[in-house]
Image (cartoon, rainbow, N blue to C red):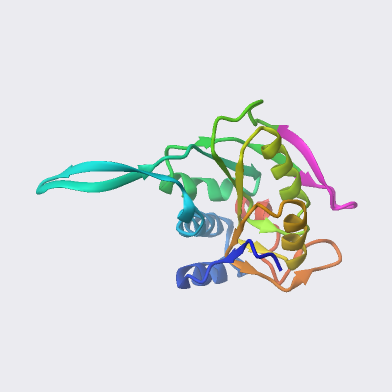
Amino acid sequence: MSTNLYVSQHPLVKHKLTLLRDKNTDFRHFRGLMRELAMLLCYEFPHDLKLAPKPVETPMGMAEGAKADERIGIVPVLRAGLGMLEGVLEMLPSVQVWHIGLYRDEETLRPVQYYNRLPVKADIGIAIMLDPVLATGGSAVATIDLIKHAGVPRVKYVGVIAAPEGVARLHESHPDVPIYVGNVDERLNEVGFIVPGLGDGGDRQFGT
């Protein structure tokens, strides 16, 4: 298993992930839970963001503060990654947002790109890829290939659940990319879905 893998141990992540998995959770509640999980995972992945000192005047005097000293880009993978975007933006409002559209060919299980709004040359220091489910790893690898091609020096993957196969593939292709997830499940089934998983993240979010 990847040494760059971070599985959240937060009790609220475990609680909300349990509700998210439930097949009886309707799409409106599912979307809300996805947003909340993204917010909670926001406490996990920025732990090494660069900071600069920033003095601040309080009602009682001056205090030594800090501010982010690194330009950040958020890359939600369409369409399932959109469910995480709102929660991340509530915690990190001053970031760029790029979009990548991929779907998985159900016969080959390979990613097919249909939309790309990455800049030709990036001006950020770190990109956060958002995709709730890391299954085969194909979409994650393809997206990170594009992000790195745009010149981003640091990339992180943030998702809700992962399969061991997806973690291994992403680590093999991009060993420098840390993976932040709520849980690593048992395995992939014969059609590339995570078991026990949560089903199709896009369909469950949007009621399709």
| Location of residue 145 in the rendering, given as x and y in whole percent from the top left corner | 73, 41
From this viewpoint, which residue is outermost toward the top? 120
Front residue of 92/33: it is 92
- Point out the image quarter for the N terminus: bottom right
Say whether residue 120 is magenta.
no
The residue lying toward the viewer, choosing from 59 and 85, is 59
Q: Residue at x 61, y 68 (%)?
A: 183
Q: Is residue 23 visible?
A: no
Q: Position of residue 48 (x, y in %)?
A: 48, 53
How many discs mark residues in the rendered view?
0
Foreground residue among 112 and 96: 96
Q: Is residue 179 left or right of residue 107?
A: left
Horizontal and vertical percent position of residue 31:
54, 54
Q: Residue at x 49, y 59 (%)?
A: 44
Asked where in the image residue 122 lies, by quadrant, the reply is top right
Segment colored magenta? 103-115
Q: Is 112 part of what is drawn in magenta?
A: yes
The answer to whether 112 is drawn above or below residue 150 in the figure is: below
The residue under the point 82% across, 68% down is 189
Q: Residue at x 71, y 37 (%)?
A: 146
Q: Residue furthest left?
A: 60
Q: Is residue 62 visible?
A: yes
Q: Residue 188: horizontal and vertical position, in percent?
A: 79, 67
121 over 167 or under it: above or below: above
